[in-house]
Image (cartoon, rainbow, N blue to C red):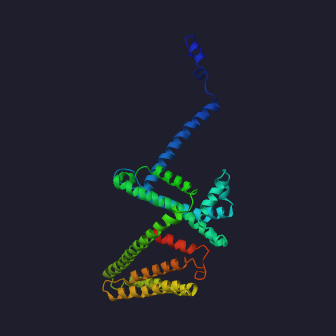
Amino acid sequence: RTQNSERWQPFLLSHPSLYHALSPRQERIQMGAYISLGLTYCACASASSLCNACFGSTAPGTTGRKRSALLLSAAVAVSLFFQYSLAPSIVNKTGWWKVYSSIPGMGKRVYAAWLDGCDGYADTPDLLRQCVQNTGVYRPTAVAALFYSVMAVASGTRPSLNREAWPAKYGTYFLLVLASAFLYNGPLFDGIFLFVARIGAMAFIVIQQVILIDMAYNWNESWVEKADECDRLDWGSGKPWLRLIVASCVALYGCAFAGIGLLYHYFSGCAENNAVITLTLIGIIAITAVQLSGTEGSLLTSAVLSTYSVYLAYSTVSKNPSAVCNPQLGNSDPWGIAIGFGLTAIS
């Protein structure tokens, strides 16, 4: 009735969008848009709740520990990508290097930056590739070290920064990693950062040993308590737990001494390698004797530390830069990387 009214016709004629009704197709599109908007809101709300549940809340009294650990995991993932995908493509001028070379001047810049300091291995392709791969790891790890150092200082002055603005922090980190791809290795990466990283690695090894010792003591005490609890209910029923402790000690010591034998077989012949392996063997015997001589000792703790010491010895001799002393020089070490990741995650 309104549309046919002479009173409203001038107004409706000046506003045709009100005069003409939507077609059935337009109505369906509009309804679909409304439904999509509602579903998008629900999805975003669910994603926000899931992130808060998995990575912690930003409410007062909380910390950014989970988000910090996630960023550390991302740094490790980027390091592996740089080492095993981006670095070989730059050396061979294939794959990802072509992406940079498509930008005028960027291909030569990236190639020269990543090979800076590796010129001495130009006659040995395998060592050249490994050198460039190492420089690829320095970049995301150096940015991560800088990021966490700044965050430590900032959180010390304002603790709430530890839990706030993590999307901006992630964005800043990845932008800095992208920028680091265009920086030369020296002196920032293979000079300053490499020196700082070696000091930090030594400190981390000491802390990691303390963590593993504490973990082994807790492991031993937990199984002894379970054995005592079973004996209180039924005398003699706790023996399986004690047998498990002994079996674990035998297995760990077996791995340790087998590892010592393999190290002597594959890496002996050089004075420095023999010294590392022999000192490791003496250390295993010494810590075992100390544990057995005390009343509060734990043989399981000695077994764990002995196995860890053999791993450290292998990491040392397998990184020897001399081809005469290191038969694995120039080859990747997936087992060493996997064990290192596992120990870091446990720590």
Asked whether, in this view, residue 105 is left or right of residue 71, the answer is right
Q: Position of residue 199 (x, y in %)?
A: 44, 70
Q: Position of residue 208 (x, y in %)?
A: 42, 72
Residue 169 appears in view:
yes
Residue at the image point whose x is 54% and y is 56% from the top: 177
Q: Is residue 319 above or below residue 23?
A: below
Q: Position of residue 229 (x, y in %)?
A: 33, 78
The single residue placed furthest to the top in the displayed view is 6
Identify the image quadrant of residue 154. bottom left
Question: In front here: 297 or 35?
Answer: 297
Q: Is residue 107 above or below residue 287?
A: above
Asked whether, in this view, residue 108 is left or right of residue 204, the answer is right
Q: Is residue 63 above or below residue 298?
A: above
Which quadrant is home to the C terminus?
A: bottom left
Asked whether, in this view, residue 104 is left or right of residue 262, the answer is right
Number of marks in the image? 0
Residue at the image point whose x is 43% and y is 84% from the top: 249
Which quadrant is home to the N terminus?
A: top right
Question: In front here: 209 or 58?
Answer: 209
Q: Position of residue 336 (x, y in %)?
A: 54, 74
Residue 76 appears in view:
no
Question: In front here: 100 or 190?
Answer: 190
